[in-house]
Amino acid sequence: MRLGFLASHGGSAARFLTGACRDGRLDAVPLALASNNSGSPALAWAREAGLRTAHLSSVKYPDPDALDAAIADFLQEAGVDTLVLSGYMKALGPRVLSAYAERLLNVHPSLLPRHGGRGMYGDRVHEAVLASGDAESGATVHLVTAGIDEGPVLAQRRVPVLPGDTVATLKARVQAVEGELLLQALRGLA
């Protein structure tokens, strides 16, 4: 498996999976990371980690079709066959979706279909879980399709919502299970 990543900020999934590849927990090779944010910590980390990197955004490519083509070309030129979204905060175009159909994964910080869809990302998800009174939350790894958070679920892990939880405490508990859940899902694709 030849992995590529798209990240907007820290790229924690890319970091975790690259470490898992390098220490033998995942039979894969991390190859490339692109970010829509030229100042993202993920880009700096990926350069230091020896991955091929690119800043690909609407600033550089104002036409959405051109941006979609640039992302697809970058990943394909790097030899990527499996793509993981690592906190990527932009919708993907049809070329990328088609090129990586059935090999494009995202981890979402809730038990989809609850608390997914447009506008549901980051702390907003944990705020929604707490506001709903749900007794549990968790993480979901799903295939990415044109609909936001609508692709088939590959794996889920549940975590309890505890009395007195804050966004920060719930987020930490959910993030603690995301890496292993991604490993499980990727092993299932191999």
Image (spheres, rainbow, N blue to C red):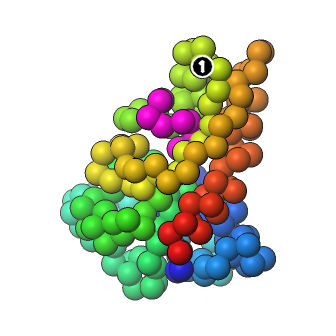
Which residue sits at x=40%, y=50%? 152
Residue 148 makes an appearance in the image: yes
Q: Residue 189: image x %, image y %? A: 50, 69
Q: Which amino acid does label 1 sit on?
A: Asp
Residue 88 makes an appearance in the image: no
Look at the picture and state if 45 lies above or below 178: below
- SS class, disc 1: loop
Which residue sits at x=69%, y=56%? 180
Look at the picture and state if 168 lies above or below 188: above
Q: Residue 141: image x %, image y %? A: 53, 51
Seen as rendered, the residue at the extreme front is 188
Q: Name the residue under label 1.
A: 134
Residue 176 lies within the magenta run: no
The magenta region covers 106-116
Front position in the image: 169 or 139: 139
Q: Is residue 111 left or right of residue 72?
A: right
Which residue sits at x=64%, y=63%? 183
| Mark 1 crowd level (few <14, some 14–19, many ≥20, 10 Å Cα) | few
Q: How many marks?
A: 1
Which residue sits at x=33%, y=53%? 145
Look at the picture and state if 66 lies above or below 144: below
- Quadrant assignment, res 170: top right
Main SS of the magenta part reads loop
